[in-house]
Image (spheres, rainbow, N blue to C red):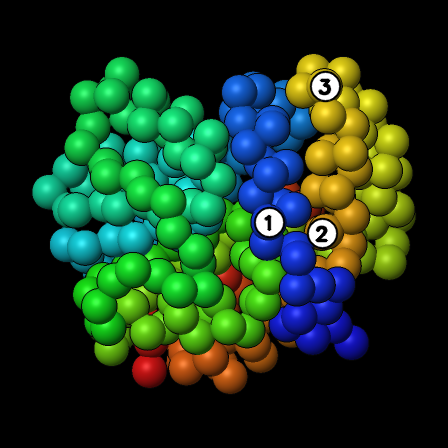
Amino acid sequence: MNTPAAGQTADKGPAVEAMFDRIAPRYDRLNRLLSLGVDVRWRREAVREALADEPTHVLDVATGTADLALMLKRARPSARVVGVDFAEAMLAVGRAKASKAGLDVPLQRADALALPFEDGGFDALTVAYGLRNFADVGAGLVEMRRVLRRGGRVVVLEFPPPPANLAGRALRWYGRTVMPTLGGWISGDRRAYAYLPASTEAFLTPEELEVALVRSGFTRVRHRLQTYGVSALHVAVAA
């Protein structure tokens, strides 16, 4: 069984930050291409869950190029939506997108393990496909719980390890061959697009992530698989 720190090392954070800075200019294009555009639908489902209780203050952790943060703001213009990430080049892309869309979504550089916000300052918190990149997943979940008010909702999108069946074998083949080849060709960084599927295979199963959420101070934890288990949507409430 994996643990919240599975496959992690003390220097993972800086290495992953540098990797995302390198691929930032082509990151959005590759997301659409490698997922065949389905990732947009996955994020829309996360937005519906995150905004179900009509929050007024929303934090998007590991926001990257701010895809989810901007979707949240469009869906609930009256809410204050803030995005944080540790990769400045990704944030620069996100800021350009926010400016072009005319959306007021502050994006700031921050470590997910030491968020620069007061306790209980947010009504909802999201993280899309970034949790497995944390240097310490357990510590990250605890920090996310700290900045959520009691009763606040957390929504996590993540790629679970492929299952041990035919579909899972197909996903592993795709991740180990197509992603590094196509991603490397377009981004110029084959190693980055070999890391991404490898990090998925080493991450927690949806059931293990549910346990980690409970241990970190969340309750009413649930998840559902998206697109035959390619993605998983987790929802929980701060206890």
Secondary element under disc 2, as helix, strand or loop, is helix
- Residue 234 placement (x, y as % from top left): 50, 61
Q: Is residue 54 above or below residue 77?
A: below
Of pointers 3 and 1, the one earlier in the residue sequence: 1
Displayed quadrant of residue 3: bottom right
**Residue at x 36%, y 73% (from the top left corner):** 145
Please rate how many residues cluster around mark 3, counting C-alpha atoms within 10 Å: few if below 14, some from 14 to 19, many from 20.
some
Nearest to the eye among marks 3 and 1: give it.
Answer: 1
Depth order, front residue of 123/166:
123
Q: Which residue is mark 2?
A: 200
Of pointers 3 and 2, the one earlier in the residue sequence: 3
Displayed quadrant of residue 209: bottom right
The residue type indicated by label 3 comes to: Gly
Secondary element under disc 3, as helix, strand or loop, is loop
3D distance between C-alphas at marks 3 and 2? 21 Å
For residue 188, which numbered disc appears in the image? 3
The residue type indicated by label 1 comes to: Pro
Displayed quadrant of residue 1: bottom right
